[in-house]
Image (cartoon, rainbow, N blue to C red):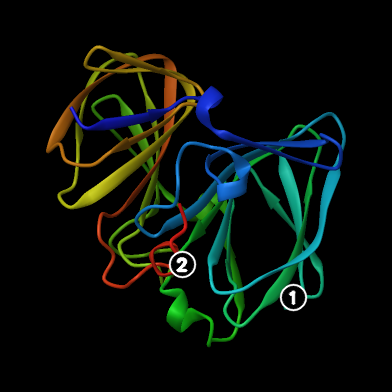
Amino acid sequence: MPIKVFTKENQANGNFNNGQILEKKPIGFPQDGGQLSPYSNLFYWAHAWASANDSTIGLHPHRGFEICSFVLKGEIEHYDTLLEKWITLKKGDVQIIKAGKGISHSEKLKSDSEIFQIWFDPNIQESLYIDASYNDFKSEEFILEKNNGVEVKTISNNENQLGLDSVGIKIFESSFTDGENEHIIEENCYHSIFILSGDLNIGDQVFNKGDFIIIDSEKKIQLSAKNNCKIFEIISPIKPPYKTYAEVHNVN
């Protein structure tokens, strides 16, 4: 079965402010030391959390990429040079920065907060020439459905609710009751899965909280969920219809 697994131990590490903010990076920068390079139109994926104290990542610039933050726990505050004010995002909220020609932003992770920050590649050869923009979405805006023991929050699907320019991105958060479930794998797509909680068995392989999984060529798989398993899943094209930044610049 074509499943690639990157356990917590095999992911890149990062930190800010002398360890007040810690990171595990399923997809890191080449200098970070992780085992996984950018693929599809996924360029960077960091799982960051704050310690017992609030901590701020200072103002820093971005260009070209679509920088998305997903609040998994607690609250964060965001400032950028387009808004020129601080705003609060809570658990379940999502923000999208289309960096375009350039934007600088700062993030404050409140005590005991937790986020994903994921960079999508929207065809940087074009996006570098558009104006930067910002948008955010509150948790209650996302549809929550329950079917056959699986509760699925749809963050983005074919309707592209987030308005991403990065092609073919779908994002879901799924909570499983303990037991067996069938999971459909889309053709010509990567399914990138982060285990948020609990345990997940696929065949004879066992995955735990913090593990990162990539599945790319099965039609369907049988899952066995235990201990209130919850996953965060991004579906993306195996071959985007443009050369990605990683391909153009040979990032590996």
What mark, if any, has residue 249 been given in the picture?
A: 2
Q: Which corner quadrant of the image does residue 200 belong to? A: top left
Q: How crowded is mark 2: few (under 14 residues within 10 Å), some or many (20 or more)?
A: few
Residue drawn at the location 55% of the way across and 23% of the way down = 9
Q: Residue at x 25, y 60 (%)?
A: 239
Type of amino acid at the residue the image marks with label 1: Leu
130 and 249: which one is in front? 249
* Residue 26 in the image, given as x and y percentages of width and height: 50, 39
Q: Is mark 2 on a helix, strand or loop?
A: loop
Query: Looking at this view, is 185 or 148 the one in front?
Result: 185
Q: Quadrant of residue 247?
A: bottom left
| 31 w.r.t. 237: above or below | above
* 55 relative position to 222: left or right: right
Q: Is residue 35 left or right of residue 145?
A: right
- Mark in front: 1 vs 2: 2
Distance between mark 1 and mark 2 Cα atoms: 31 Å
Q: In which quarter of the image is the N terminus?
A: top left
Residue behind mark 1: 83
Residue drawn at (14%, 33%), measured in percent from left and top?
A: 220
Please indicate whether residue 15 sits to the left or right of residue 43 in the image.
Answer: right
Packing grade of label 1 (10 A; few <14, some 14-19, many >=20) is few
In the image, residue 101 sits, relative to residue 187, either above or below, namely below
Name the element at disc 1.
Answer: loop
Whether residue 72 is visible: no
Compared with 38, 12 (above or below) is above
Residue 109's spot in the image, x, y percent?
77, 45
Looking at the image, which is closer to me, 111 or 35? 35
Left or right, residue 107 beside residue 172: right
Percent position of residue 153, x then y:
40, 43
At 26% across and 71% down in the image, what residue appears? 241
Please provide percent x and percent y for residue 11.
54, 32
